[in-house]
Image: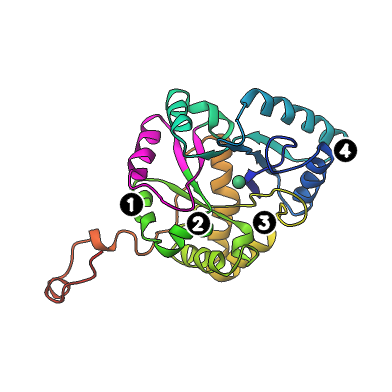
Amino acid sequence: MIDIHHHLLWGMDDGASSLDNSVAMAKMAAADGITHVVCSPHANGQYAYEPGIVADKIQELRQLLDSENVGLKLGRGCDFHMSYENIQEAKLDPQRYSINGQGYLLVEVPDYGLPRGLTDIFYQLQLAGLTPILTHPERNPTLQSDPERLIDWLRGGVLIQVTAGSVVGRMGKHAERMAQSLLEKRWVHFLATDAHNTSSRPPRMQEALDLVAKRYGPDYAHLLCVSNPLAAFIGKPLPPQMEPLELYEDLKPKSWWQRLVGGKDR
Ligand SMILES: [Fe+2]
């Protein structure tokens, strides 16, 4: 499995608290069957994102893991928050924030007060050559109460990452319910751990993969945990996706009967 969202690096944010803690998280991820991790510290007003420091820390951790025979491939990325400064910088230098500098960008939106202009911001990021991946919408209270906000973004090519812990009920009932609803509609493109430590936010995906495979089929589980995140890791286009439900229905031509009774309008 490939984990594209993981706060593995020590001393960067509220993730790993020490180098020892980073090593313990890496070992836990490898034991769970994770083969690649994108180290994605927060990039927000509280935590400045410095790609040079991230690269140095990845190098240091990689050497340590090699010496202990932990075969985990490490990549660079960030947990990009939608601040004005971040957006301007990402448009000028799209490689700076994206996964391994290859164009896929993890984007977190505010929990409350989502501006209507977000659709346009996603579009501007795309014009700069970036592919936005919206992180854990199932944990966002505004999107939980109004999931249809996702429709325009999905139609515009924004991808969705759900937290593995949400799928198995570790992030609360609301997040679990919305995660299942998004999965049911095949609106999800990635599962990722968003791990912060080895206890309350651990780097585990296998249980979520198994649940998705059981409920929605092994092909979808493989797409979410292996094929799609691998494409993001190496900067290639995603493979063919499952057909999403309830996303394009109102754009399809209606039969005479649907037109007569009004059909379903959004
Ligand atoms: Fe995160």
Q: How many marks?
A: 4
Residue 6 image point, x, y percent: 66, 44
The magenta stretch is 103-132
Relative horizontal placement of residue 151, taking residue 99 as reference (left or right): left
Task: Answer with mark 3 or mark 1, whichever residue precedes in sequence.
Answer: 1
Residue lying farthest to the right in this orientation:
68
Residue type highlighted by circle 2: Asn
Residue corresponding to mark 3: 205
Residue corresponding to mark 4: 68
Q: CA distance from mark 4 to mark 2?
A: 38 Å
| Mark 3 in CB contact with mark 2 (< 8 angstroms) | no
Q: Is residue 112 magenta?
A: yes
Q: Look at the numbered disc 4 and give the secondary structure of its residue.
A: loop
Q: Label 4 neighbourhood size at 10 Å, few (<14), some (14-19), many (20+)? A: few
Q: Look at the numbered disc 3 and give the secondary structure of its residue.
A: loop
Task: Answer with mark 1 or mark 2, whichever residue precedes in sequence.
Answer: 2
